[in-house]
Image: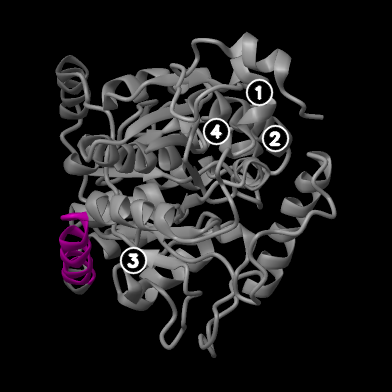
Amino acid sequence: MNILLCPLSDGGYLYPALAAGRELQRRGHRVSVLGRAAAAPFAAEAGLPFAAAEEFGGERAFDAARWGVTGLGQYRAAVRAARQVHADLLVTSVLCNGALLAAEALDLPVVVIGLSIHLWTYRSGGAGEPQYGRTRENRTRETLALYTATREQAGLAGRPARRTALDDSPLLGDALLLRGLPELEHPGAELPPRVHHVGPLAWEPAADPAELAGLDDALARTGKPLVYVHLGRFFGGGSPWPRLNATFTGGRYQAVVEQGRTGDPRPAPGADVLLVRKPWLGPLVDRAGLVLTAGTSAPVLGALLRGRPLGVTPNGSEQPVLAGALLREGAAVHLPRAPRPDPAGLLDAAWQDRSLRARARSLGHRLAEAETGSARRAAELVEQTARQPATSRENHGYSTSRPGPRGRREPLGGSAELDRSALRIS
């Protein structure tokens, strides 16, 4: 089977897709990766062939920060790349509307790799779930509106989706794979039938030993216990830096702050803060005793897999829902965004909370058990999805771009100009 991975190219979305892709390749399938050019080294380290979306008309596509406005570029690039490799199935990310529409246009099955928790409306149950900022219904409605707008831009308006059942939202693809645990969902909630928990799909590029040695030298200068800070891109009420500076100036702890995700770094001159920009987080969490995060999936899963408790400061997307689940499980404490009279005191209380640490280790142990076989479960669901009956897929629409035997497959990225001139895409 020819499989095209076309996830969002940020690590939190790309790496789980690469984990699944490696297992699919090991099982004998031909797997290719489409993404922003910056993702090429990571696909190479994973051992998977790669092509830049920019070469297929996808300039600025597959950027998680711009997911709501780059769907058309995703659509064009995914259609062209899928035609070139004669893809039998697409694997994409949650929120990747353009890839979902490419699968529809080519009549291909599509598997969506989601976050650690379900974002949208439950099939049933979930009564009494606290509404953090906005309801699931509101989040579902807004996400579907963006999907519909992209569909219209792609010239697919008015074409019926293959699935019509009430709980068969197009946002789920033919299967949606969640990377958390069932207990992270609200008690009593029933997920749609095409949503499956597969485990973390943990993979990241290896850290350079020389970089780690330099990091250890820098941290040893203060000798203070380490907190890893991975807050995310959006903070709503303003910069997190007043709180971070107040917490890590003249106190007991030092922080490593992932500046690629916190944005606009403003550490105070006397703050015990080390800024980093790394494509990996595992070694940083290994060195830390506590993780501060807005509640995005990558740092939460990374912390729990290593048994680290969390301090959460949620804002948008899955952050409030995931943070609420962690608080319910007792694996995290809530740290307010605004500076308090004694910000270091809140951190100290969390650090010394034995119950918090025990519950984080317990949840992390269950997550680590799910990680064993996570890629295998994902690959099996991809294979199962490909076998499911659907509408006719005999030629996948390839006759519009590459006539000839069905079995022929071009190397991804090898003939983009030839395909581009033959495609009929608005």
Disc 2, SS: loop
Residue 371 is inside the magenta segment = yes
Q: In the depicted view, which residue is nearer to us: 75 or 38?
A: 75
Which is closer to the viewer, label 2 or label 1?
1
Label 4 Cα neighbours within 10 Å, binned few <14 / some 14-19 / many ≥20: some
Badge 4 is on which residue?
A: 263
Residue 401 numbered tag = 1
Which is closer to the viewer, label 2 or label 4?
2
Residue 34 percent across, percent down from the top left: 49, 27
Q: Tell me the CA gap for discs 4 and 3.
A: 23 Å
Disc 4, SS: loop
Which residue occupies 19% across, 67% down? 366
Q: Which residues are magenta?
A: 356-373
Which quarter of the rendering shows the C terminus? top right
The answer to whether the residue labelled 3 contacts the one labelled 1, judged by CB atoms less than 8 Å apart, is no
Q: Amino acid under label 2?
A: Thr
Which is closer to the viewer, label 3 or label 1?
1
